[in-house]
Amino acid sequence: MFELFKTFFQIGFFTIGGGYAMIPLIEQKVVDEKQWVSHDDLLDLIAVAQSCPGIFAVNISIFIGLKQKGNKGAFFSALGTCLPSFLCILAIALVFQQFRENVYVEHFFHGIRPAVVALIALPVFRMAKSAKINRYNVWIPIVAAFLIWMMGVSPIFVVLAAGVSGYVYGKYLKEDFV
Amino acid sequence: MITILLQLFWTFFLIGLFGFGGGYAMISMIQGEVVGHYHWMTMGQFTDIVAVSQSTPGPIGINSATYVGYTALVNAGYAPYWGILGSFLATFAVVLPSFILMLLISKFLMKYRNHSSVENVFSGLRPAVVGLLAAAALLLMNSENFSSMAENPWRFCLSIFLFLFAFIGQKVYRLGPILIIVLCGIAGIILGL
């Protein structure tokens, strides 16, 4: 149990830049070192964790914990994944609160803000490729973006509507919908 | 106080439940709820939170939930220890749906992953998530993050330049996000942005 916690704590602590950056480390720790799952199993797990809602890395850790030690294992794995994030951010938030008014900190964040927008804009194109956007379905992301951007519709509602429409369209309107 | 804690919990529970498409798609949802709906913080503050979440260890979804939970309470005028409670609640809430769903479907999903109904749902979801990301980027392109020609032409032009630098730096030269963030921050200090 403690092994699960420790392993995922290390994975959480030593990866920066989000869930997908964790895959190589998960592979090294969980498959090569501990041999909790095989290489093929991990690929399947990644596919399933991607198609589930929620945080990718947490989903994977819950899966592996569940497989190793049942419900308790799942709990400790997830805790291990979340705890480093939680502690780091709290430490930063508590400190940042005091330095917010500092003029250099302000300049630093003014410089960062445009870069963050660029870093969020980039995955749009990467995702467009993997979501197989073509001239027949390109209207879907455009309408989704317009609803959220201009009309102030909640993204949660857009995701819900898109899932339901996909289901209805595939089931009742078009037999050979991809 | 109780209201804002309950709202935090419910918001992040929903985000965890409908958060398809990875950390960046979740950021779009958090932005929609936290800035657009509840006005717990400004778009500029939210951008700072995203910057910190990207450059600290751990999944971006967890990092931003923790940070938003803290900031929402402190912004509302409560002491930092209430902020810690807020961050705990938000983090717990965003993970909870994963837990419930995984326990329920870990046995079934492997079998039904290629079932046509599941495929249909995802054929609608995937393109929409692309739109979600685009909307998040568009919403962040405001005067708070870039300033404006009328307000501060120097900062506005430099912001555009840093945006292009970050975009091209990652897309063409494959610089890591942390390196880009640190370089742009230093540029901000030197140029007095």
Image (cartoon, helix red, strand yellow):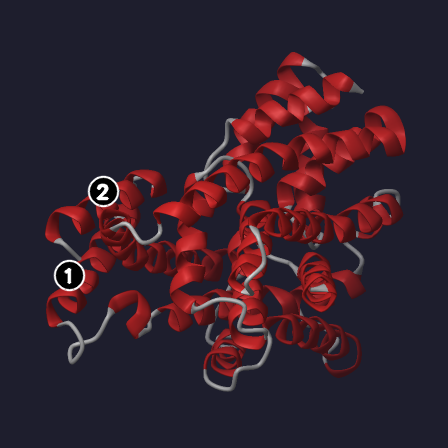
Residue B111 percent across, percent down from the top left: 84, 47
Q: In this view of the protein, can residue A124 be seen by the observer?
A: no
Kind of residue indicated by mark 1: Leu
Q: Secondary structure at mark 1?
A: helix
Residue A140 percent across, percent down from the top left: 54, 77
Q: Nearer the viewer, residue B150 or B32?
A: B150
Q: Within 10 angstroms of label 2, few (less than 14), some, or many (20 or more) residues?
A: some
The chain containing the residue under callout 2 comes to: B
**Dot label at residue B158:** 1
Image point (86%, 44%), residue name: B103
Q: Within 10 angstroms of label 1, few (less than 14), some, or many (20 or more) residues?
A: some
Q: Secondary structure at mark 2?
A: helix
Residue A2, quarter of the rendered image: top right
Classify residue A148 as left or right of residue B10.
left
Classify residue B59 as left or right of residue B16.
left
Placement of the N terminus of chain B among the 4 image quadrants: bottom right
Image point (66%, 76%), residue name: A157
Q: Which residue sits furthest bottom?
A: A151
Badge 2 vs badge 1, beta-carbon distance below 8 Å: no
> Compared to B72, does A159 lie above or below?
below
Residue A83 percent across, percent down from the top left: 64, 34
Disc with the residue nearer the chain's start (2 vs 1): 1
**Dot label at residue B145:** none
Kind of residue indicated by mark 2: Leu
Q: Nearer the viewer, residue A165 or B144?
A: B144
Placement of the C terminus of chain B among the 4 image quadrants: bottom left
Quick check: do tags 2 and 1 share a chain? Answer: yes
Image point (59%, 64%), residue name: B126
Separation (CA) of disc 2 from disc 1: 13 Å
**Dot label at residue B183:** 2
Q: In this view of the protein, can residue B181 be seen by the observer?
A: yes
